[in-house]
């Protein structure tokens, strides 16, 4: 069996760790967003519920980082995800009476950052 010198072994370990960190690994992060079939009344109810349960809803208010685009689906998705992330990331925390669904891609945009 061939012996590898200590400096060579160290170089191998360093290069291996660099390469491993460049491989894309499937993310275990998930976000909760509103379904496209949810009605405006359901979306508004989800916003009201989330905001009444301790979710910070300032970002969806006028001037907030997630106010634009000013649509119910975008505002509800932000609130629903904040609730989901702060309530154990469970299936139930994203249910919202079957108006929530999971996204594997970060829905953040511009200055509007969704918790993960």
Image: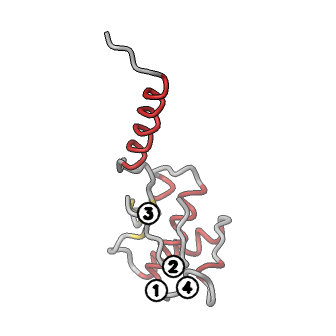
Mark 4 vs mark 2, CA separation in Å: 7 Å
- x, y percentage for residue 98? 39, 62
- Left or right: where does residue 73 sit relative to residue 88? left
Q: Nearer the viewer, residue 98 or 88?
A: 88
Is there a contact, CB below 8 Å, between mark 2 and mark 1?
yes
C-alpha gap between disc 2 and disc 1: 6 Å
Q: Mark 4 touching mark 2, by CB under 8 A?
A: yes
| Quadrant in the picture for the N terminus | top left
Dividing the picture into quadrants, the one containing residue 65 is bottom right
Q: Which of label 3 and label 4 is nearer to you? A: 4
**Marks 3, 2: nearer the viewer:** 2
Q: Which residue position is annotated with label 1? A: 71
| Secondary structure state at the residue bearing disc 1 | loop
Badge 1: residue crowd in 10 Å (few <14, some 14–19, many ≥20) = few
Which of the two discs, 1 and 4, sits closer to the camera? 4
Percent across and percent down for residue 51 are 63, 72
Q: Which residue is mark 2?
A: 75
Residue that numbered label 4 is attached to: 67
Q: Residue at x 42, y 39 (%)?
A: 15
Residue that mark 3 sits on = 97
**Where 93 falls versus 63 (above or below)?**
above
Cα distance between the residues tagged 1 and 4? 8 Å
Q: CA distance from mark 3 to mark 4?
A: 24 Å
Give the left or right position of residue 23, taking residue 53 as reference: left
88 lies above or below 45: above
């Amino acid at each position: 069996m061939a012996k590898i010198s200590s400096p060579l072994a160290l170089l191998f370990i360093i290069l291996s760790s660099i390469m491993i960190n460049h491989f894309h690994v499937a993310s275990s992060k998930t976000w909760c967003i509103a379904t496209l079939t949810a009605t405006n009344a359901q979306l508004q109810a989800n916003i009201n519920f989330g905001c009444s349960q301790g979710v910070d809803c300032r970002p969806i208010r006028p001037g907030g980082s997630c106010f634009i685009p000013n649509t119910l689906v975008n505002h509800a998705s932000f609130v629903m995800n904040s609730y989901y992330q702060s309530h154990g990331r469970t299936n139930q925390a994203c249910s919202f009476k079957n108006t929530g669904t999971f996204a594997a891609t970060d829905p953040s945009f511009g200055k509007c950052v969704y918790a993960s």
